[in-house]
Amino acid sequence: MVNNSLVLQKMRKQKTCFAGFPTPLQPMPRLTEALGGPNLYVKRDDMTDLSFGGNKARKLEFLFADAKNKGADTMISTGAVQSNCACMVASAARRLGMKPVLVLVGPEPAVYDGNLLLDKLLGAEINFLETYGPHLEEYMNKLAKEYSAKGHTPYVVSAGASVPLTVPGYVLALQEVVSQFEALNKTVDYIVCTCGTGGTQAGLVLGTKLLGVDTKVVGASVFASKEDASKNIVEMANGCARLYGADVCVGVDDVVVFDDYIKEGYGVINNDVKDAIKLMAQTEGIFLDPIYTGKAMVMLIDKIKKGYFKKDDNVVFFHTGGLAALCLYRDELSKL
């Protein structure tokens, strides 16, 4: 039988520290009142100390530790043109004295805005590909070979940085939240988060297993069906457990993710998202992004209205960042 506390200690030792943890846990009394309960809190991972903040910082602490251990001096990453992850890879690379190289999928815009503007300010080498497909990996490997030929040691980061190696970032985040609630003499009943590539939710769910807590993690998928999202979460959580020799197993029944809130599609803002962003800003003075946390807040509001939570439940909304995207939706949001 493996001691889970030793697993957690091992996780903490296998990361580099540059993102400023713990992040604040804040009550949301005005939003709680506006929605008629339950007791709502927000975990401010939008305040991680990297770029404009966000959940990728916790994951990148593990990737960059691995990269440094392998002698890497160049980080090659990918994502959509406005990728939060790619921007944070570039920011972390600069902080650690490494060169950032980005392969962004989509046409090059006439005006650099949002995360793309930040990428430019960070001095990242930016390459554009029109579409996703097998050619993306081929192109990244080609870049890696070119940098190797120049005497560099490149390290390739997959889209979203969601691999078993990075899952401990949110295992430790779960432990962080539990400790913050213990300091309040309370327990956390639910965690609500966005589910993109699934790494954040995988870490949170695995964390509940390792800590032996009854906290339920509820994810709002932003592009994948709940079947595909659940499968990804299970695979990443169990891959991480094997990596660290943890004596736990995550099954599909342990994963709760809803795909009802994708609606018109990934990155498409609708009236529900706009209303959720407005409500959060005007009750708690906190901004959400239109692509990820805005849709997770739509889910939280809808589930409260439908009685999914009990009135006395303590519910934590994980703010996973992405705020640079707000300026990309200025036309829609300025009409609120």
Image (spheres, grey):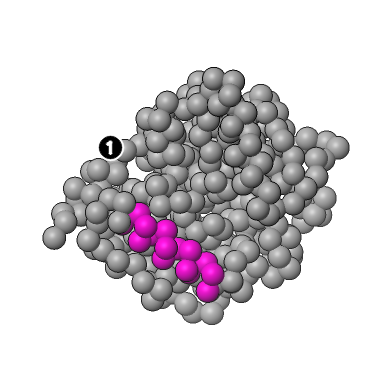
Residue 56 spot, x, y in % from top left? 50, 44
Q: Is residue 254 visible?
A: yes
Which quadrant is home to the C terminus? bottom right
Residue 142 spot, x, y in % from top left? 63, 36
Q: Is 260 above or below relative to 222?
A: below
Give the residue at x 65% y 53%: 134
Kindly identify the amino acid type of the residue bearing the numbered disc 1. Answer: Lys
Q: Is residue 185 visible?
A: no
Q: Is 313 above or below relative to 154?
A: below
Residue, far right: 110
Name the one closer to the observer, 323 or 118: 118
Give the residues in magenta: 227-241
Direction from residue 189 to residue 196 in the image, left or right: right
Per the image, is 282 magenta? no
Residue 252 spot, x, y in % from top left? 41, 73
Q: Which residue is mark 1?
A: 13
Name the one closer to the observer, 195 or 286: 195
Q: What is the magenta segment's predominant secondary structure?
A: helix
Which quadrant is home to the N terminus? bottom left
Name the one closer to the observer, 135 or 238: 135
Give the residue at x 41% y 52%: 164
Give the residue at x 63% y 33%: 143
Per the image, is 233 magenta? yes
Direction from residue 225 to residue 177 in the image, left or right: left
Q: Secondary structure at mark 1?
A: helix
Residue, far bottom: 306
